[in-house]
Amino acid sequence: MKEQLTVVKVGGKIVENAAALIQLIRDFSTLSGHKVLVHGGGRTATDIAAQLGVETRMIGGRRITDAEMLRVVAMVYGGLVNKNVVANLQACGINALGLTGADMDVIRSHRRPAGEIDYGFVGDVDRVDGDRLTALVKSGVVPVMAPLTHDGRGSLLNTNADTIAGETAKALAAHFDVTLVFCFEYAGVLQCPDNADSVIPHITPAVFESLVKDGTVSGGMVPKLENCLAALRAGVKRVVITRADLIGRAGGTTVTL
């Protein structure tokens, strides 16, 4: 039987807030089995960019990453935010190691081709080295993944943290019984957008199709759930969508096949 491993993805709103980060670390430390943490940090990147006189441009919620912005996100994601999370984990007795995709060549990507929109130095994941991550995890280390990858030719690439979490979970599924947890602002997928308590407890592919058909699930939640189902089909055991302060507790939306 495979050992258990949980991949938790949290956004910048959590790791950039001192009180929320402390609570996250406490909850994360109580999870049983092996663990991996994936984080964002967009608000801090925007703040630091402004202080440095670098313009932030967003299209459809995605950051345009030109050469100057790449310098900012590399400093913020791989440095300031990542090491702050690692330091707080160490203070809680968790032996954490901060990683970008370039470290140990754990995540290789290619620069997204310019189409109607040129996102600049933004990476789409080609592969995650599950063997190397497994070796780290089994040595007692908790990887803390920043949303940066590399192209193997010397360039860092800004990469979506949800994508990193999903691809990391897929790569580790060959070695562990993996649960992937996505944390966002609600306690789960909602039956009624105006009712924060209307959490749908369980979604399967058939339920997903029904929810899309009747309009319950729409907009950005559709690709989120499609990514969840893709992870499951690639070997991840279960996916949970919940709030950061509810990880490890009953509730949320569980997605299974």
Image (cartoon, rainbow, N blue to C red):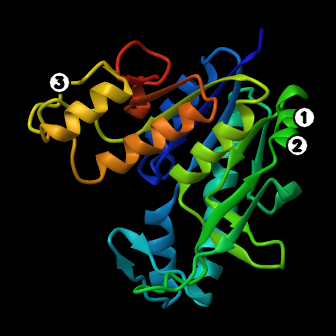
Q: Is residue 23 left or right of residue 113?
A: left
Considering every residue shown, the one lying at the far top of the view is 1
Q: Residue at x 70, y 66 (%)?
A: 109
**Residue denoted by label 3:** 197
Mark 1 residue element? helix
**Residue at 63% in and 39% down:** 37
Find residue 72 and report its image quarter.
bottom right
Question: Which residue is pictured at 61% across the width and 57% down the height?
Answer: 81
The residue at the far left in this view is 194
Distance CA(mark 2)–CA(mark 1): 5 Å
Instruction: Decide which of tag 2 and tag 3 comes sooner along the chain.
Output: 2
Residue bearing the label numbered 2: 132
Residue 6's spot in the image, x, y percent? 63, 26
Disc 2 + disc 1, Cβ < 8 Å: yes
- Is residue 187 at least partly visible in the picture? no
* Residue 213 placement (x, y as % from top left): 17, 39
Whether residue 147 is situated above or below residue 119 in the rendered picture = above
Q: Amino acid at mark 3?
A: Asp
Q: Which residue is mark 1?
A: 135
Q: Position of residue 149 (x, y in %)?
A: 70, 64
Query: What label sits on residue 43 in the rendered view?
Result: none
Classed neighbour count for the residue bearing mark 2: other residues with Cα under 10 Å, few (<14), some (14–19), many (≥20): some
Q: Is residue 131 above or below residue 129?
A: above
